[in-house]
Image (tube, rainbow, N blue to C red):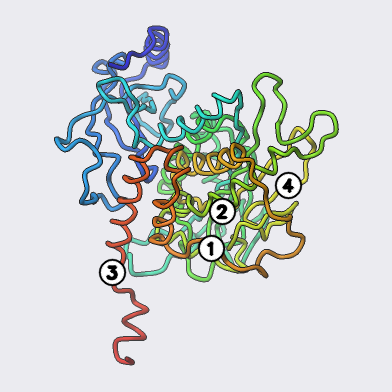
Amino acid sequence: MKQIDHNDINHINQWLDANNITEIECLVPDMSGTARGKIIPRHKYNPAEGIRMAEAVFTQTVTGDYPEEEFASITDSDMRLIPDPSSLRLVPWAKDPSAAIIHDAYGFDGKPVEIAPRNVLKRVLQAYDDLGLQPIIAPELEFYLVQIQPDEDLPLAPPVGRTQRTEAGRQSFSIDAMNDYDEVFDIMYDWCETQGIALDTLIHEMGPAQMEINLDHGDPLDLADQVFLFKRIAREVAIRHNMYATFMAKPMQGQPGSAMHLHQSIIDKQTGLNIFADAKTGDSTDIFFSHIAGLQTYLPACMAFLAPYVNSYRRLSRFSSAPINLEWGFDNRTCGLRVPESNAAGRRIENRLPGVDVNPYLAFAASLGAGLIGMQQGLKPSTPLTGSAYDKAANLPHHLDDAVAELMACKPVAELFGEHFVRCYSAIKETEFEEFFEVISPWERRFLLLNV
């Protein structure tokens, strides 16, 4: 049975007592990145034991359905959820002093549950650690604020701000347009500070009431936790101001989609230096180019992680500030892979493929994992593009079912992520696609009902 360190138990109990905690949100991110778990009174919570919950929670689709094939135990048995002491946080919107603790999933044999998304990222990070390497990542999250609209058949609209008007046109980088929602962002910043989410910058993006939050660079597991928690904060703040915060990849017709661009680099643990740049000359290293080549080669097989829903593929269209292929270039935002201008220490790759609708644990694992395989195989990238990547062919999966087929056919990704996990995830996505395919859209009724 998995044992939690005695010092960690003491740390958790002391922190809970010091903050007068009366209630605990025991959280675990599921396959869609949604918070699952239990809410437990402080006096009934024992961090040495954690909590128990059915392993099948990781096999749910985003609609709450399940694949026909069983990927958890056939008896629907429990797993152990063990608290990660580094994830202790206050819940700033709770009426009574409350804590949120992210838990890791283990079987009763002490082994990590292979289909738990946080464990998948840990598995990839362990592969880096075995090589003496530490990946660094910095996510940029785009999202929309929209009016509350209970009717799912009606389109979304931007919310009313302090001017009592909705935004007119597109307001890219507008300070005044952001200030229209000052009350939302003031609380959002305060709550993020309470939960240890290191916000860097706030930007108004292209769409009406579309915002971008950048997080400080750091350890991928910690940053994935921060993204997971930030989405909860953004939704909670928005609802309290009579609006929604949505992380759909393409929530509004005719408007830009929302991405989660990932900046990634790698540090040699022994020297503390960025291995993407030569320490003496500052030139890009062979490992840097192999990492890019790995992204070019294996990200198509990882598309189901980076574009996980049928809606995700609406974002990836030509001339939409979203990539249609995996060309790469220096400071070229038309490419799926961009290398920003930087000094040697800051040499990094920006993966522009993921939508903001991703599970951050799986998106980080996919992006870092694809680059790692490229490094291990010594792959060579294409020539960096100096023109527009939109003039090149689109070579990414166009639909979720295509992406799942590519994932299932890629052995190196299955070996890195775990074959059982890949089969489980693929089955979940196939089930979601089949459910979506049963829905007849308004477009079909409008143009096909009486015309064909």
Q: Earlier in the sequence, mark 2 or mark 3?
A: 2
**Residue identified by numbered label 3:** 439
Q: Earlier in the sequence, mark 2 or mark 1?
A: 1
Foreground residue among 149 and 51: 51
Q: Earlier in the sequence, mark 2 or mark 4?
A: 4
Amino acid type of disc 2?
Answer: Leu
Residue farthest toward the front in the current orientation of the protein: 377
Q: Earlier in the sequence, mark 1 or mark 4?
A: 1
Asked whether the beta carbons under mark 2 and mark 3 sit within 8 Å of each other, the answer is no
Rendered image: mark on residue 448: none
Residue at x-position 31% and y-position 64%: 436
**Residue identified by numbered label 4:** 340
Rendered image: mark on residue 316: 1
Count residues near mark 3 (Cα–Cα under 10 Å), then give few for <14, some for 14-19, many for 20+: few
Residue farthest toward the right in the current orientation of the protein: 281
**Residue identified by numbered label 2:** 353
